Image: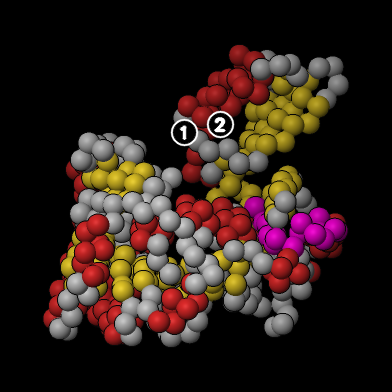
Amino acid sequence: MIIPLQQSDIDTDTQESKVDIMALIVQKFGGTSVADTQRIRNVANRALKTHAQGNDVVVILSAMAGVTDHLIGLANEATKTPDRRELDVLLATGEQTTAALLAMMLKGMGTKAQSLLGHQAEVVTDCEYGNARILEIGTNRIKRLLADRNIVVVAGFQGVDIKGNITTLGRGGSDTSAVAIAAALNADICEIYTDVDGIYTADPNICPRARKIKEISYDEMLNMASLGAKVLQIRSVGVAKKYNIPVHVRSSFSQEEGTMVVQEDSVMEQLVVSGVTHDLDQARITLKKVPDQPGIAAKIFSPIAESGILVDMIIQNTRAAGQTDLTFTVPRADYNRAMETQKKLAEKIGAEEVFGDPNIAKVSVIGVGMKNHSGVASLMFNALSRENINIIMISTSEIRISCIIEEKYTELAVRVLHTAFGLDKED
């Protein structure tokens, strides 16, 4: 939860006029955007241009592409089990480097600028090293620098816990840093610069007819982020929705407009499905002939939870004679650990067999228009059936339908569903 120093909400009625006159703009640049000094200079030029138009500018930076993985590798060379606190201290140096370099360049270009690390920007988090959550952001220092016409450069991905220890926010955490700081400052917009030019109706790498989406709702983006789309960290979208921060996802390498992530409107509801996603990070586990009695599900999933393994989809099929089959999915990286816990458990609870499959994928269709249109599930299932793609599991929500299928059919399924829901069309 974000608790801004100033709790005022964005005034949506005056937002447009504020942007026309002078805006407070938060710009976040990902690892590929700051991969070397030349690209950092491009970031400096972009920030300068925005600043020269009379806007207040706060820039949030990730580490250079590949640096975080390199630092993790060094930690693993130092010890097989790096201390989580010290690992966060190490990883935070990646963003510290890019923030300092950008501030140096801006000053060298004759512009006032100052870099701030997470603790200097008063990004206060809980004590969960490696995946900390922001509790509070103090804005006094940033506001003083902005009032003096500085471009403020903040190291993303990091904060400080209540004990004064450096913490990091998890993979993609700079997105959350940017949106959270935008919320705390009551910014007019948060621009997320990356190596893609927006959010697409499907992954363009496997679906040639995928199109860039001009606007998408927070809820649609939340679902897309959780179901395989890698453009925005899901926590950042949740913060943007809570504080009504417009997020503009765009490319660092062009001047083209990208995709706006905003509140849902009536126009969005007219389109039944906005996008198709896929997720290859899936594995399936089934317990066969489990005793069908109260408390059995708790016994099955408690060891999974204690191991820190996330469970996604769950299906239970009741058999005769007081037995049931229970199937669930976990991240593929956790498949072996989850199988071990379930095999040990099966004998204790009287299950006949435990088996699984790590070679599955999840394909999903997402759209706020599903709330007002019938027949979406039927259309999806028929489209997959025509290509002889078997559906192993199904999960639904108000604006999303997900199917587990064999991994080898993933690309075909995405293209088929993209066409079936009319997303191939330019208009």
Query: Which numbered marker is on residue 115?
Result: none
Where does label 1 land, which residue? 308
Tell me which numbered mark, 1 or 2, is placed earlier along the sequence.
1
Residue 45: name its quadrant: bottom left
Residue 114 left/right relative to 11: left
Q: Is residue 166 visible?
A: yes
Q: Quadrant of the N terminus?
A: top left
Viewer-nearest residue: 147 or 377: 147
The percent coordinates of residue 134 (x first, y second) are: 37, 46
- Give above or below for 358 relative to 37: above
Q: Quadrant of residue 213?
A: bottom right
Q: Is residue 301 left or right of residue 152?
A: right
Residue range highlighted in magenta: 362-377
Would residue 368 be counted in the magenta stretch? yes
Disc 1 and disc 2 in contact, CB within 8 angstroms? no
User: As shown in the figure, which amino acid type bears the numbered disc 2?
Assistant: Met
Magenta stretch: includes residue 153: no
Local crowd size for mark 1, using a 10 Å CA cut-off: few (<14), some (14–19), many (≥20) = few
Nearest to the observer: residue 400 or residue 120: 120
Residue 353 locus on image (x, y percent) = 68, 25
* Res. 339 mark: 2
- Residue 395, horizontal then vertical, whole percent: 71, 46
